[in-house]
Amino acid sequence: MSNGILYSNEDTIAAVSTAYGEGGIGIVRISGPDSLSVLRKLFRTGRFSVPDSGEENINATSPNTDATGIATDSSVNMSDACDIDACAEFESRHMYYGHIIDPDTGEMVDEVLAVYMKGPHTYTCEDVVEINGHGSVAALRKILALALSHGARMAEPGEFTRRAFLGGRLDLSQAEAVMDLIEAETDGSLSAAASQLSGRLSARIHELRKDLMDILVDMAVNMDYPDEDIEEIVYGKLSDSLKGLIERIRVLLATADTGRLLKDGLKVAIVGRPNVGKSSLLNALTGMERAIVTHVPGTTRDTITETIDLGGIPVRIMDTAGIRETSDEIERIGIERSRASVQEADLVFFVVDGSDVLTEEDREIATMLKEAGKKTLLLLNKQDLGGVLTEEDAAALLPGAMVKLTQLRTGAADEGRVSEVLEELVRGMVYSGSVKQNDAVMITGARHEALLTAALQSLTDAAARTAEGEPLDLIEIDVHEAYDALGEIIGEAVAGDVVDQVFARFCLGK
Ligand SMILES: Nc1nc2c(ncn2[C@@H]2O[C@H](COP(=O)(O)OP(=O)(O)OP(=O)(O)O)[C@@H](O)[C@H]2O)c(=O)[nH]1
Ligand SMILES: [Mg+2]
């Protein structure tokens, strides 16, 4: 493997699978053949009581007596807890109440619920144990450390999902969807990831590959038993099939722009000269007092970024320092950042004071935006003070930009509507009219897009060769390339380093 890690399914891995930090619960996950034996060494069922407390305390029970996971009236004391063989059979998929005990010291680490899931119908296709402890960083670390010193090794990032892939439960595109799902920030990103995880993209790829295989078989037959009389029919049929497949791949690829937006979101830079209402716009969009707003020009010095959900698309909004000539060192650096954020942005909100005449600064910013060639929405703000600038002025300032009249003064009556208007606008700008978010199979990954593009190219070459009447064995090479490229999307016959790259994105514990 390219990163030097030897992946083997024969060992047992463990990791904290919930986010590090304080939480109601936290989960240590263990997967592999020794999962249950690790659990047995650490876990004692029933209530835990301190020895010599005067209570009746030695009554370790088999977990079977409490298959519902509800606390029983059994209890164990520390010395009993050290008796590692005292835990009897665990029934698969039953939750057991008990404690994690350090077998070496008898120390009670955490009160937990533990579940053992026998493979292969588990997340990893292996025996899996999950220990639900309190979400304390220290306790989770300790439970993990105990698991590691009693038969498990630390999981690599993404290794649980990698095992699901190697076990054949998920194909590569579904494994990628797991990470997309974890990272999803909006309903839109979530449903795109969930659809991919459910295998809708995989199914579409399988259909395409099946049809390509039919073509390859037909071609092979005709190559083996060439029949001059039907040559025209063979080429005609081949040409039709290729055209159909090319069209279907095109339709799929057409979803890539929307898919990418749903997954990666959209970056929007708010720019303008000082005091026009940029921070007021950020606050209106986020619905909170995120940035300081004052009447003093030059209030915002640094770039402030906040993510919001606009119509299902995660939108990262960057409020920037007002752009002007300045001798102030800090402000100057802030303005450099404003310019940089324009370069980074997919979309620019350019705010001008619509109640005032245009200034030289407005024109300079407009020139910068023209040069950057970014899609821009021009907001003529402060309409409540009386509109001085007209839509014609705006069109002259930045030809091609969309224009909106706004009033963003805090507390102004229509402040809330700004986000609605902008949402409508962002949707209109980014969704290519024909794509419906919910019912289409969507391409959300750059890797998938590149492979589909490669397949499309190979098939286009094949179609051109067919039209030229070139020999079938040449055409076959192109069709085969397309077949392989599509296979790589779902992880069929892919090289180990591709798999490594896919799982390198994953977090620990997944
Ligand atoms: N009357 C009126 N005042 C507004 C409107 N929008 C913003 N303001 C006011 O204009 C002033 C500047 O607003 P900010 O949002 O801080 O402007 P900015 O563009 O972020 O300014 P800098 O950070 O200095 O570049 C504040 O006093 C706002 O309340 C508006 O639509 N109408
Ligand atoms: Mg500001």
Image (cartoon, rainbow, N blue to C red):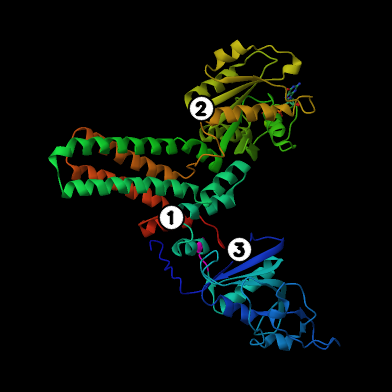
Classify the position of ligand 1 by quadrant: top left, top right, bottom left or bottom right: top right
- Mark 1 or 2, which is nearer the eye? 1
Write down the residue under mark 2.
Answer: 374
x and y percent of residue 393 in the render? 60, 12
In the image, residue 366 above or below residue 27? above
Crowd band around label 3 with a 10 angstrom C-alpha radius: few (<14), some (14–19), many (20+): some
Q: Give the quarter of the image for residue 453.
A: top left
- CA distance for labels 1 and 2: 31 Å
x and y percent of residue 241 in the render? 31, 38
Per the picture, the main secondary structure of the magenta-coloured stretch is loop
Q: Helix or strand or loop: what does disc 2 sit on?
A: loop
Q: Helix or strand or loop: what does disc 3 sit on?
A: loop
In the image, residue 446 above or below residue 331? below
In the image, residue 128 above or below residue 203? below
Q: Earlier in the sequence, mark 1 or mark 2?
A: 2
Residue appearing at x 48%, y 64% in the figure: 163
x and y percent of residue 394 in the render? 59, 15
Q: Which mark is residue 194?
A: none
Q: Give the quarter of the image for residue 208.
A: top left
Pick the front one: 481 or 408: 481
> Pointer 2 and pointer 3: residues touching (CB < 8 Å)?
no
Pick the front one: 306 or 174: 174
Residue appearing at x 48%, y 36% in the figure: 257
- Residue 322 appears in view: no
Write down the residue under mark 1.
Answer: 501
- CA distance for labels 1 and 3: 21 Å
> Pointer 1 and pointer 3: residues touching (CB < 8 Å)?
no
Q: Give the range drawn in magenta.
A: 155-159
Crowd band around label 1 with a 10 angstrom C-alpha radius: few (<14), some (14–19), many (20+): few
Q: Which mark is residue 17?
A: 3
Pick the front one: 95 or 323: 95
Q: Does the magenta stretch include residue 158?
A: yes
